């Protein structure tokens, strides 16, 4: 049934829908219409290595599935991978022996850094495979990402000190320190020019025109680290405890704040996020190998080794980036060859009839705080623009609040349920889009 059928959205639920609600009320499922079993599974593409090497890391991916990273250990050599042509080396500036490629935009422009023994690292931009310097603020520099407008970001550490300069680079303005009064490191930039990274003991979000916003860390954790920012202004990162021996991942959403999303081991690091709020990284247990993970609002936080079709041949160690089609890049251990190599994962569950990958249309992040005595916040993420209804229903299936009913643009949208005006009890947030719906349970208590 089309999402434009207003009678379905605004009235009491059908008997079938009520049965689902009743099952949820009994604790049979925390999410009525979508289960963790529906998280995507992936086919694994071995990206190989550059000639003569036995090690490679995939670090960034663009919308077209092009991948950048590096191959080799001493020296490391930057590469660009394209379907059909494979892995091609990106040469550094004259005199540079070591190179790394960190980010790639949809036009195929790549950024990273290069250096040599006794020669400080310098940020590089590759256009059609040709390297050019981006400059240095204080001694050394490395670029981590580039957006569709060609804005590059990264960091310029001062040699021999604890000071690091987070920079933004444009052709018109050159390299500019975006937090000149602080020591800060920049890791990611979105297409609106917003930058995230780490400043002192917490994560930050820098926006053109409004400047620096300190996001801090999760409650109870001493240090916060911003690692990825998407076009909705969401920031994904991780928080570390005071002892430094445990960390958990978070996602910050404007209007909602920072939400603890757990971990797959004692220590967890986030590296990349897409526009739908899906993010990837790595988690480490107290003993044994670290393992790559993916977070989606549909499937929660999952170890990627449980979701690939190449087990037990491959053990995925780290996932470093994810695009809007859900393709993931990183590196893992090939148990047959014994080599650690770059991979790209292509989601099976999102493959269309032509073999292309489509962004998920609608997803609802876990509400927080839940249970709540006053206000519960939630984030709806859309892969495409559509008409959406967001309603709150009681256990009998009657709508008690309508949070939204109308068109919404792609990206993340924050909503708040005012629990203080509702009686204590169990409620359901039902989101209906065009051809898809998601329901989530919340508890109100006074």
Image: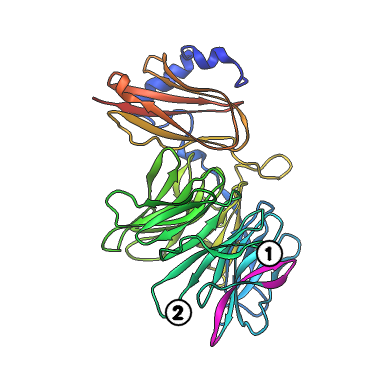
- Confirm whether the magenta stretch covers residue 126: yes
Q: Position of residue 372 (x, y in %)?
A: 30, 31
* Residue under numbered circle 1: 81
402 shown above or below 113: above
**Residue placed most toward the observer, 184 or 101:** 184
- In the image as oriented, which residue stretches furthest toward the left? 446
Relative placement, left or right, of 273 versus 77 is left
Q: Position of residue 371 (x, y in %)?
A: 30, 32
Main SS, magenta residues: strand
- At 68% from the left and 58% from the top, the residue drawn is 66
Colour style of the rendered protein structure? rainbow
- Mark 1: which secondary structure? strand
What is the quadrant of residue 368 in the picture? top left
Q: How crowded is the residue under tag 1: few (<14 C-alpha within 10 Å), some, or many (20+)?
A: some
153 shown above or below 130: above
- Mark 2: which secondary structure? loop
**Residue placed most toward the observer, 214 or 384:** 214
Q: Position of residue 101 (x, y in %)?
A: 61, 68
Residue 304 showing in the rendered view = no
What is the quadrant of residue 134 in the picture? bottom right
**Residue placed most toward the observer, 311 or 225:** 225
Specify the segment rendered in magenta: 117-132
Query: Where is the C terminus found, in terms of image quarters?
Result: top left
Could you give the CA–CA distance between mark 1 and mark 2, rounded to whole angstroms? 33 Å
Q: How crowded is the residue under tag 2: few (<14 C-alpha within 10 Å), some, or many (20+)?
A: few
Residue 223 showing in the rendered view = yes
Tag shown at residue 73: none
* Residue under numbered circle 2: 159
Pointer 1 or 2: first along the chain: 1
- At 50% from the left and 60% from the top, the residue drawn is 178
């Amino acid at each position: 049934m089309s999402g434009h059928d207003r009678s379905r959205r605004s009235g009491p639920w059908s008997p079938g829908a009520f049965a689902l609600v009743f099952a949820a009320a009994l604790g049979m499922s925390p999410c009525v219409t979508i289960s963790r079993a529906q998280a995507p599974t992936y086919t694994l593409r071995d990206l190989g290595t550059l000639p003569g090497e036995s090690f490679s890391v995939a670090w960034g991916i663009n919308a077209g599935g092009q991948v950048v990273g590096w191959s080799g250990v001493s020296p490391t050599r930057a590469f660009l991978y394209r379907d059909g042509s494979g892995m091609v080396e990106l040469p550094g500036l004259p005199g540079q022996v070591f190179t790394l490629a960190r980010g790639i935009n949809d036009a195929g422009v790549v950024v990273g850094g290069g250096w040599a023994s006794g020669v400080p690292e310098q940020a590089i931009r590759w256009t059609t495979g040709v390297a050019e310097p981006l400059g240095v603020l204080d001694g050394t520099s490395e670029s981590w990402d580039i957006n569709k407008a060609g804005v590059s970001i990264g960091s310029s550490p001062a040699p021999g000190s604890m000071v690091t300069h987070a920079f933004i680079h444009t052709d018109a303005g050159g390299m500019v320190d975006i937090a000149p009064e602080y020591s800060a490191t920049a890791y990611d930039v979105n297409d609106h020019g917003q930058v995230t990274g780490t400043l002192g003991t917490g994560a930050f979000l820098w926006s053109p025109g409004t400047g620096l916003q300190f996001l801090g860390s999760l409650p109870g954790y001493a240090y916060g680290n911003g690692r990825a920012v998407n076009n909705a202004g969401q920031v994904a990162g991780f928080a570390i405890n005071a002892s430094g021996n445990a960390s958990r991942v978070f996602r910050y959403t404007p209007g909602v704040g920072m939400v603890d999303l757990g971990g797959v081991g004692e220590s967890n690091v986030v590296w990349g996020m897409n526009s739908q709020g899906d993010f990837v990284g790595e988690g480490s247990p107290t003993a044994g190998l670290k393992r790559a993970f993916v977070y989606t609002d549909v499937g929660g936080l999952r170890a990627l080794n449980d979701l690939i079709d190449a087990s037990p041949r491959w053990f995925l160690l780290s996932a470093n980036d994810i695009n809007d089609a859900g393709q993931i890049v990183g590196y893992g251990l090939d148990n047959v060859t014994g080599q650690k190599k770059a991979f790209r994962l292509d989601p099976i569950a999102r493959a269309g009839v032509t073999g292309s990958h489509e962004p998920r249309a609608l997803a609802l992040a876990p509400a927080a705080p839940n249970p709540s005595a006053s206000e519960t916040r939630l984030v709806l993420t859309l892969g495409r623009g559509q008409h959406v209804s967001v309603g709150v229903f009681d256990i009998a299936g009657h709508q008690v609040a309508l949070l939204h009913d109308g068109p919404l643009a792609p990206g993340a949208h924050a909503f708040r349920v005012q629990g203080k005006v509702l009686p204590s009890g169990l409620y359901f947030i039902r989101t209906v889009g065009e051809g898809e719906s998601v329901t989530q349970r919340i508890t109100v208590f006074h």
